[in-house]
Image (cartoon, rainbow, N blue to C red):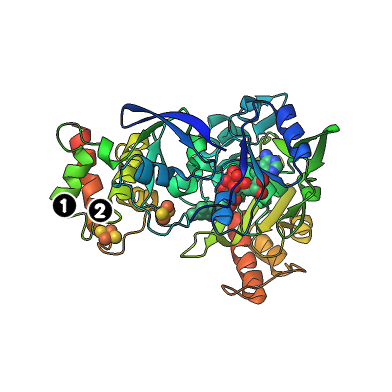
Amino acid sequence: MGISIELEVNGASVSEEVEPRLLLAHLLREELGLTGTKIGCDTSQCGSCTILLDGQAVKSCTVLAVQADGSEITTIEGLANGEYHPMQQAFWDNHGLQCGFCTPGMIISCVDLLSTNPQPSEDEIRHGLEGNLCRCTGYHNIVRAVQTAAETMNG
Amino acid sequence: MFPSKFDYHRPSSVQEAVQILSDNPDAKVLAGGHSLIPVMKLRLATPSALIDIGRIDALKGISRANGSLRIGACVTYNEIANSGVVQDAAPLLAEAAGQIGDRQVRYRGTIGGNLSHADPASDLPAAALALGATLHVSGPNGSRSVSASEFFVDLMMTSLQADEILTEVEISAASAGTGSAYVKFEHPASGYALCGAAAVVTRGAGGSCTGASLCFNGVSATAVSANGVAASLVGSDLSDGAIESAVSNLSIPDAAGDMFASAGYRQELAKAIGAQALRTARDRA
Ligand SMILES: Cc1cc2nc3c(=O)[nH]c(=O)nc-3n(C[C@H](O)[C@H](O)[C@H](O)COP(=O)(O)OP(=O)(O)OC[C@H]3O[C@@H](n4cnc5c(N)ncnc54)[C@H](O)[C@@H]3O)c2cc1C
Ligand code: FES
Ligand code: FES
């Protein structure tokens, strides 16, 4: 049984006929070709599949595509606007990534964090990123990247 | 990984949802999906249909009237933790909701899903018990109310019937002189509670304790009330010593161990964080 859904992905309207069991992560990666969003654990733990759903960071491996019907979605591909988003630039400048696998989800979570708390303390940054695991960096440079981005974004 | 096939329904009213649920005995209600979708992906649950209640407006409100706070079943943890109304009327619930999982989980998970799922390590059951919450439920024969103390029956089992939906959680707004605290000792990897303690204390005009409750998640199959501890605190001055001696007799009859922590360890943890929750609640009263 196919269900028609309509959403806005990175500013573009999308209409798809989907099976109810299709996960949002698979819609983005396989149907829409947006492979920036990663699937790491596939068990709701690691956060590498994090995207913005109506402006809120969610794990797209734990949301059905049909649940996102009518929503606005931003993936890592949609952050840059001609030039890098300040968070992307800050990750680059602070060496906030090594293998890069966690990075798309991590950056999306960091953007979400600053949208609710524009000047987080180091502690708030570390707690705010509880839902994103990184096996490479040890997190220090990620925290620095968020601090740098907060400074840039607060002008 | 993806779930096995199912039909998807998205009713716009509680009546419609209840109707679909009673017509499809093998169907499940889908709220935030943050317990149900993971178990469906693992094929530990294979419902023939999902009834997505996430768009029913009647389940999404937070309101306060006549001294009672009402929270719709589909209100998310993020909304509860950040609601000024909840922070004022039931700060314990806001504090517990803010400690669940991570940011992403808090945007999706709902109070109704948390209570209905009744995972022994969930954070909201003990808070609901300690606050004496009333749960409103709708089924094919109309609505009924259940107290939190009658709602949690056994491991992941509630008094909800298969064709019933939890619609609303009602809590009496905190009165003057009342303080509360939720203290959670997390498993370092999963973030779930090895033990979570929810405490509420009320102090009378002279400062002595006129009411107390202390409830735990994570120690046994369901959230439990430490009635003995609460009873022995009433009338005391709530000093550290009084709290220490009340908690020293704590014994949770059906404490259960698992691969992470033995029953005995959880009992000791309950004493330690129970006392911590009571001290913090006292300081806030
Ligand atoms: C990474 C991760 C970390 C987590 N950490 C924690 C934590 O620290 N503490 C914690 O408490 N929880 C934690 N959880 C679980 C989370 O809180 C879930 O959201 C919650 O257990 C279920 O709520 P839900 O709204 O997502 O419900 P769903 O997953 O949609 O449903 C869960 C069950 O309840 C039933 N149900 C849902 N709503 C209703 C209703 N209104 N009436 C009747 N039945 C209903 C469903 O049919 C299903 O059986 C975590 C989850 C994840 C993925
Ligand atoms: S892939 Fe979604 S949380 Fe790990
Ligand atoms: S950079 Fe490799 S997992 Fe984070």
Q: Is residue B212 left or right of residue B41?
A: right
Q: Chain of mark 2?
A: A
Q: Is residue B216 above or below residue A145?
A: below
- Residue at left 51%, top 65%? B187
Ligand 2: give its quadrant: bottom left
Residue positioned most to the right: B141
Instruction: Determine whether the residue tagged by mark 2 lies in a helix, strand or loop.
Output: helix
Q: CA distance from mark 1 to mark 2?
A: 8 Å
Residue positioned most to the front: A1
Spot occupied by residue B41 in the image (x, y as percentages of width and height): 54, 55
Asked if residue A126 shows in the view, the reply is: yes
Q: Chain of mark 1?
A: A
Q: Which residue is mark 1?
A: A94
Q: Nearer the viewer, residue B146 or B172?
A: B146
The part of the image, by quadrant, that contains residue B229 is bottom right
The amino acid sitting under disc 2 is Ile
Disc 2 Cβ-to-ligand 3 distance below 8 Å: yes
- Residue at left 53%, top 50%? B100
Q: Are marks 1 and 2 in contact (CB under 8 Å)?
A: yes
Q: Which residue is mark 2?
A: A142
Spot occupied by residue B35 in the image (x, y as percentages of width and height): 58, 51
Q: Is residue B217 above or below residue B62?
A: below
Q: Nearer the viewer, residue B36 or B153?
A: B36
Disc 1 Cβ-to-ligand 3 distance below 8 Å: no
Q: Nearer the viewer, residue B252 or B50?
A: B50
Instruction: Determine whether the residue tagged by mark 1 lies in a helix, strand or loop.
Output: loop
The part of the image, by quadrant, that contains residue A86 is top left
